[in-house]
Image: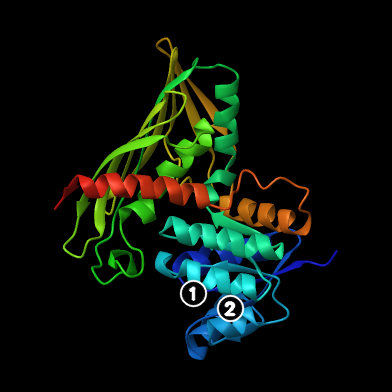
Amino acid sequence: MSALRWGILGCGAIATSAIAPAIRWARDAELVAVGSRTMDRARQKAAEVGAARAHGRYEDLLADPEVDAVYIGLPNGEHAQWAIAAAEAGKHVLCDKSLTLHVDDAHAMREAFARRGLVLVEGFMVRHHPQWSALRDLLASGAIGGVQHLRAWFRARLSNDADHRWSPELGGGALFDVTCYPINLVRFVTREEPAAAQATGLFTASGVDAETDALLEMPSGIVASVHGSLRAPFEQGLVVAGERGRLILERPFVPGWEPTSILVDVDGSMERRDVSGANHFLHMIEHVTSHIRDRSTPLAPAEDGVANVEACNLVLAAARAHART
């Protein structure tokens, strides 16, 4: 079977520095085209990432008959429009997180792909790092007993006020940029969807949240505390607390390529479980490529992302009701 031919829509940093190399290195995948808003920019990026063709309009990349699947690396607020356009053009899509901003748009995206028998995946690359399957295995083995509480946080400082992640029109804000990671992995670890949320947010004058804090109540009774900020020094972490102890991930969201570890703290005894290094962007591309080529392979650990949009909207409604300025 020939390689799956990928195009990249949007020339942001992650698309060109992480996704493009991952496609080039992946088994059964080939990077063939880049699309941008101008031909000069598209040619520059195509040369930079090693793509054979450049398109100066998004529509032209979607119309390219030699592109089978598209990575959408545009701002959050543009995902729904261009993902649906890609489905109408017969392309599979791996869409950068967050899939979209509104539940109605998320369902419209899912329907557009399902109707045409195409694959839609939300690009949470962290799901494909081996530390998460190792953590799930520890939980399944009863290493810390029944899970009672999770605490996850992801913080970074976004100093450029002109960055699109501060734009309400383009879907900016901490919730859809960083807090969505803890939310996603609370769902991944518990295998449940939030039943209710209590939240607060620190909102800018434009209505974009600079920080989000939430308590998620899961159907099993597990409570999860999630936090994200775009106004703080870089910091990340996850703690899973159980009846007998806790599991700690020190680099849950930005692990790098080096080996990671899970700290297992049971009854006051601390043990470090090493996890091999990995490029989770590469693992994600190979996983999605494999699923597109053979639908009988499971989509998990990836997902279409609709449930995460629903969870984020649950948090957003609660945060707006208890907004701080």
User: Would you place residue 146 above or below residue 132 in this image?
Assistant: above
User: Would you place residue 66 above or below residue 256 in this image?
Assistant: below
Residue furthest right as drawn: 1
- Left or right of 103 in this view: 113: right
Residue 259 picture quarter: top right
In primary-sequence order, the first of circles 2 and 1 is 1
Residue shown at 76%/53% (left/top)? Answer: 295
Q: Which residue is mark 2?
A: 34
Residue shown at 60%/48% (left/top)? Answer: 302
**Residue type at the position of mark 1:** Cys
Q: Which residue is mark 1?
A: 11
User: Would you place residue 274 above or below residue 230 in this image?
Assistant: above
Residue 232 seen from this side: no
Residue 319 drawn at (x, y percent): 26, 46
Q: Quadrant of the N terminus?
A: bottom right
Is the residue under label 1 in contact with that under label 2 (CB below 8 Å)? yes
